[in-house]
Amino acid sequence: MIKFLLEKEFKQIFRNAFIPKLIVAMPVMLMLVFPWVANQEIKNVKLSVVDNNHSATSERLINKIVASGYFILTDVSASYNEAMQSVDQGKSDIILEIPQEFEKDLHKSKVANVMISANAVNGMKGGLGSAYLSGIINDFSNEWRMENGEETATNLPFSFLLSPFSPISSQFRFNPTLDYKMFMIPALFVMLLTLLTGFLPAFNIVGEKELGTTEQMNVTPMNKGIFILAKLIPYWLIGIVILSICMGLAALIYGLIPANIATIYLYAVIYILVVSGLGIVISNYSDTMQQAMFVMFFFMLIIILLSGLFTPVSSMPKWAQMITAVNPLKYFMEVMRAVYLKGSGMRELLPQFFALCGFAVVFNAWAVLSYKKSR
């Protein structure tokens, strides 16, 4: 019985000229475009400089800031009020004011003041832009100190950077280049699998309801479990193909190769069953394609936003963190990032394994029980 059901499902899929093209085109577009645009790294911050010193040292500081690649010098103002007008007009995001006695203070007292004023309408740009600018000034401070024979960091050249500690040398683990694409690409795999293997099954059964073929299936002596299994297997195989295409493109284009491929496929098999089961549950309760689409979109929007795709789960409010505990997308996203970035294996990812297995059992059992043969 299941052989003929699977044959029917695959024929339905490949008779639709759009689905095979979607299976190939969507992973290609995702790998070529999304890693470059789904980026929370702040660059091209518009900087306005008020240089009251006009010395070689202040000019060197400005050139170092612009050369960092994070800032665009959009305005050199004669006064702070003029720079504020640039901010009000949206031409600048951050103001750096260098005092008149900047170079003189450096050579005389080894301490000089500079002022950073950030437009916090966009809190992320204002906060990160200020942090970047402070880091560049700190680096300039260390350079100046070394060039002038200062061996300790107890008297850094800038008063807002005074510290009793020695210079800190940072070492970044797992993503040493701090390339945000390396963090986002594994998560984009998960998002694509969620969308395709969730929406396509959701449209399957309800599509047959609209066409009337479900009534023909209901009059056969067919077990509900076999029927749902026949619906799941094609999308399970489609999900594996999509994941393989994404992994191949990630290795080819970005040089991103997982340390443990078998672990990824094991968790992917379980996760695809989870989202496909959810799609079939929604399809069972829907009467039209439009209804299934809106319900599925509602759930997808929630689970994607609460998955940690952009915002870390630990940064969410406590009530939101409690909701993420029943979000299967969060667990698979943790798996993908852990395997790709940290080289984690099955032992480190056992909690996610048991969680996904539980979701798979619940959603697929629900799909079988919610399918009604008498309609």
Image (cartoon, rainbow, N blue to C red):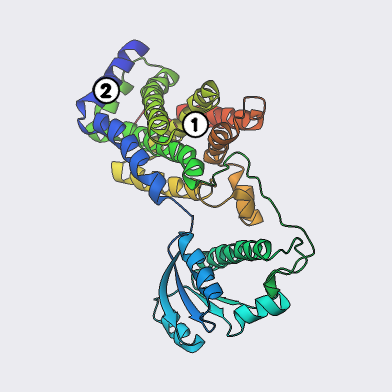
| Residue reaching furthest to the right | 164
Residue 136: x and y in percent read 57, 63
At label 1, the amino acid type is: Val
Which of pointers 2 and 1 indicates the residue nearer the eye? 1
Q: How dense is the environment of label 1, judged by Cα within 10 Å: few (below 14), some, or many (20 and up)?
A: many
Between residues 269 and 33, which one lies in front from this camera angle? 33
Precedes in sequence: disc 2 or disc 1: 2
- As helix, strand or loop, the secondary structure at mark 2 comes to helix
Between residues 163 and 56, which one lies in front from this camera angle? 56
Q: Which residue is drawn at the image coordinates 39% and 39% (left, top)?
A: 195
At label 2, the amino acid type is: Gln
Q: Tell me the quarter of the image containing the C terminus.
A: top left
- As helix, strand or loop, the secondary structure at mark 1 comes to helix
Residue 70 visible in this rendered orientation of the protein: no
Residue 216 is marked as 2
Left or right, 277 with respect to 168, comes to left
Left or right, 355 with respect to 5, comes to right
Residue 90 is marked as none
Left or right, 58 with respect to 6, comes to right
Residue 32 visible in this rendered orientation of the protein: yes
Q: How dense is the environment of label 2, judged by Cα within 10 Å: few (below 14), some, or many (20 and up)?
A: few
Q: Quadrant of residue 92?
A: bottom left
Between residues 106 and 185, which one lies in front from this camera angle? 106
Residue 154: x and y in percent read 78, 66
Count the marks: 2
Residue that numbered label 1 is attached to: 274
Residue 232 in the image: above or below residue 174: above
Q: Which residue is drawn at the image coordinates 67% and 76% (left, top)?
A: 107
Residue 36 in the image: above or below residue 75: above
Residue 147: x and y in percent read 65, 63
